Amino acid sequence: MQLVLFLRLTNASKRNNRHVSLFSSFLFLCVSICKISILQAESTHSIANHRCDNSNSRVNDAAAAADDNRLAEEMNNPCVIPARPEDVVGDKRWESMHKRYVTEARTSEPEVVFIGDSIVQQLQFSTIWTEKINSLHCLNFGIGGDRVEYVLWRILNGEFEFNVPIKAVVVFVGTNNTDCTPHEVFEGLLEIVRAVKSKLGGVAIVLPTLLPRGQNPNPYRERNDHVNTFLLDKFENPANAEPGLTENVHVVRIHGGIVQGDQTISHHVMHDYLHLTDSGYAKIFEPVHSKLMQILKN
């Protein structure tokens, strides 16, 4: 009887030991699975972070590359680099006019300054200048044949050193940059705006649109029209507003109503299909006069 009891207890103990052994193996397996899961999670997180870092790095690299491309484009754009014209004839007329304008800037008391090419220069001999514009206390710094980069140079080299506050500046230039793209001319005009603001602070800047040219349709007429599109989109579209650049800049549309229904330009408006007649000035520059009146009243 005692032997039977002993055998029963021995068998029970063996069964219990097997259960304990199986349970221990099960626990070990669970712990191992957990450790593997944790390692996989950490590895996945590490890979995700690495990918995120690489993605951010690629974004930063792309932004830096875009900035470099813009800088390279600007450096290749003659319109944004201040320059003086080559004195091919040798009479130094351009230099003489520039020096005169520097003197006028320092000795006069204007409220409005016009600067630009021959269309600005010849404006002072028109009836609308004599009867309307000149009474606004204006200076005319126009030079025939001037390009965007020449006007930029003049602004930065003495012509905008005034002894009195200036209320408005009218900039009209670009049609002589015939070897430049519309966007290059546009970027040059933006550079002029920056230069004017650097010299005169928050002065009002008026940008009349470029005029069509040539009796019949031609690439230069189209190019000027594209420049106008860029200007209007930049300064009239709120989505393109740029602090420090677009404030108090007024693009005045003066290019309409010149091209006739048959796409030609009359010599009664432009006597040489580039420069305005007296009646042409009266019609085309009236919106500029109205804008100046509005600015000076505020």
Image (spheres, rainbow, N blue to C red):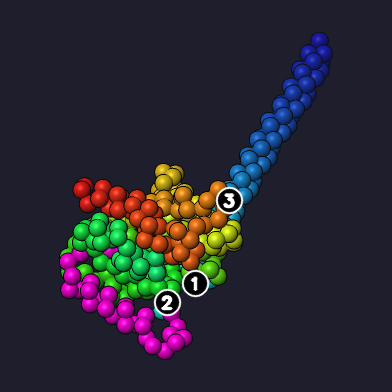
Asked whether 96 falls inside the magenta stretch, the response is: yes
> Quick check: 50 left or right of 171?
right
Nearest to the observer: residue 162 or residue 38:
162
Residue type highlighted by circle 3: Asp
Dot 3 alpha-carbon crowd within 10 angstroms: few under 14, some 14 to 19, many 20 or more = few
- The residue where tag 3 is placed is 262
| Image point (20%, 73%), residue name | 106
- The residue where tag 2 is placed is 83
Residue type highlighted by circle 1: Pro
- Mark 3 or mark 2: name the one nearer the start of the chain: 2
| Image point (59%, 61%), residue name | 219
Furthest residue toward bottom: 90
> Quick check: 144 left or right of 112?
right
> Quick check: 214 left or right of 117?
right
The picture places residue 123, in percent across and down from the top left corner, at 34, 64
Residue type highlighted by circle 2: Ala
Dot 1 alpha-carbon crowd within 10 angstroms: few under 14, some 14 to 19, many 20 or more = many
Q: Is residue 256 visible?
A: yes
The span from disc 1 to disc 2 (Cα, nearest Å) is 8 Å
**Magenta span:** 85-114
